Each structure stands twice: as C-alpha cells, then as structure tokens.
Amino acid sequence: MNNAYQKKQILVRTLTYILLVFWGLMVLFPFYWMILTSVKSYSAYNSEYVPKLYTLAPTLQNYKDAFAAVPLMRYFLNTIIFTVATTALMLVVITLSAYAFARLSFKGRDLLFTGFLALMMIPNELVIITNYVTITNLHLRNTFTGLILPSVTSVFYIYLLKENFGLVPDNLYYAAKVDGTSDLGYLLKVMIPICRPTMVTITILKVIECWNSYVWPRLITDDQAYFLVSNGIQEIRENGFGRENIPAMMAAVVVISVPLVVLFLIFHKKIMEGVARGGLKG
C-alpha cells in the first residue's frame, strides 16, 4: 500500500516538474529570442528564410548602432529622473493616505475609502483623457512636472498598504499615544518599519511601472529632450533604423530591459513577501 502511494507521489511530482519546466521555457523563450536576434548581423538575419535558434557569428555592432541612432543615454537619464521623482512622491502620498484610512478616525472615513476603491473600476483610457486635458490646460506638456503629476498616487497601492497597516496591533498605537508620540512619529517609527517588506514591494513595482511607461509619455511629450526609454524605442523604429532592421531594434530593447531584469532578480523574494503580506487579514 505504501509502495503504491509512494509511486503515485513520485509520478505526480515528476509531472509537476515537467509542466513547470515546460512553462518556464515558454516564458523565457521570448527573452532568449530577443538576445539572440540582437547579436545577429542585419544580413544574416534577413538571409534566414527559416529562423534559426542559434548563430555562429555573433556581433555587438547592433548595440553600437542603437546608441548611435538616437540619444539613448539621454533617454536613460530622463527615465531615471522620472522614475525616482514619481516613486518618491507616490510613496509619500500613499503612505499618508493609507495611514489615515487605517488608523485615524474621522467622519465618513469608510465611505471615502469605498469611493477610492470604486475608482479602480474606471477604465484607464478615461483617466488618461482627463489627465491629458488637465495637464494641457495647465501648460505642462513637454515638462517633467506634466510627466510626473498624474502618476504620484495609486488606489491599489493605498489599499495594499492600508491592509498592512491594519495588521499592526492597536495596542502599539495606544501605548505610543500614552508616551506622547504624535501620529506622524508613530507612522515613521512604528508603522513603516513593521511594514517595510510591503513598502519595498510597492517601490519596486512602481519603479518597474515607471520604467515601462509608454502611453502617457508618448501622449504628453513630443519634445525629444523629454523622451523616456520607451519613447526611444519608437524613435529608433521611426527615425533611426526603420522597421526592417530588427536586430538593431532588439539590441535597443535588450539594453532597456536589463535594468528591470537585474532589479527583479535582486528583489524578487521581497516582492513575493510583500504581496503575500498584503493578502493577509488578521
């Protein structure tokens, strides 16, 4: 009986690992294909009637061409400024908002929070239209302020952080108030250190979101001085290599993707830990 059970467990485990390996290969294959294409020469790529899964003559010329076609380093600097400023401002906004909803008592708090959650059901396209009209009327097009302002808050992150703040025992808050600690001091000294994994997760996810931003920067800027890396890809496609030089395009995409891949590999455990904590309710 035990042998039959053990064989069944081994079979189930083997099938599980086979499916996981297959799924992993399916997920990683686009990245492999991107890197492979980026090291193929233009002539070699175009001569392949049937795409090959390898190359015998890799080249880095495509990467040189990517930096020569457009000011890619300027786009990197713009993206870093946009990402750092947006993430820092958002952390301040969502932290204060989440603390108010989780710990402070005021009239209409629950109703207001329900209204915030209802905003998540509004299609993003409608929000973009409203933001575009607002930023245009304020004459903030082609400015970092216009790029940053619409992204300094997030209902989902407020909800996630509010749930984490709600897990902190009330006794700590009452003890801090007895000791004369202000609400801001309690937030900085108690709440944020306890909920640091979630804060780190939100920071990383926001950085990834800002780095990948395309629609809003493309809509609100037409000045090359304010282009982000996502706009740089389109600029390369339209005014750099044209649509036929796929290897050079892939080289640019690899360069832009590397920072995010490295960031995720370093902090993936923190991301999973923070998301898991956000799903707990005590």
Image: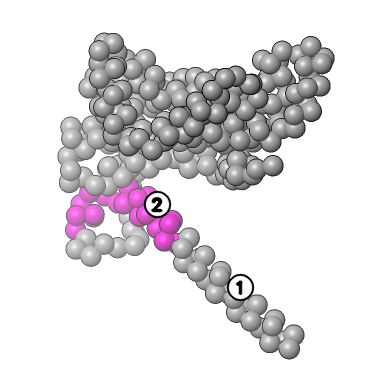
Q: For the C terminus, which image quadrant?
A: top right
Of mark 1 and mark 2, the one earlier in the sequence is 1
- Nearest the eye: 244 or 18: 18
Left or right side of 182 for 94: left
Residue 65 is situated, as x and y percent measured from the top left of the image, at 27, 36
Residue occupying image coordinates x 43% and y 34%: 118
For residue 41, above or below residue 64: below
Count of labels shown?
2
Tell me if label 1 and label 2 are in contact, CB under 8 Å: no
Amino acid on which the number 1 mark rests in the picture: Arg
Residue with the mark numbered 2 = 31
Residue depicted at x 39% and y 19%: 149
User: Residue 192's image quarter?
Assistant: top right
Give the dominant element type of the magenta stretch: helix, strand or loop: helix
Residue 259 placement, left or right of 73: right
The answer to whether residue 31 shows anywhere in this view is yes
Q: Give x and y (percent) for residue 114.
A: 49, 32
Q: Residues within 10 Å of mark 1 (few under 14, many from 20)?
A: few
User: How far apart in space, not on screen, are marks 1 and 2 (Cα)?
Assistant: 28 Å
Residue at 25% in and 12% down = 137
Tell me where residue 257 appears, x and y as whole percent: 41, 40
Task: Tell me the magenta residue range.
Answer: 25-47
Say if the magenta span includes residue 39: yes
Look at the image and say whether residue 43 sits in the magenta stretch. Answer: yes
Say what secondary structure mark 2 lies in.
helix
Question: Which residue corresponds to mark 1?
Answer: 13
On the image, the x and y values in percent for residue 136 come to: 25, 16
Please say whether residue 91 is visible from this viewpoint. Answer: no
Label 1: state its secondary structure. helix
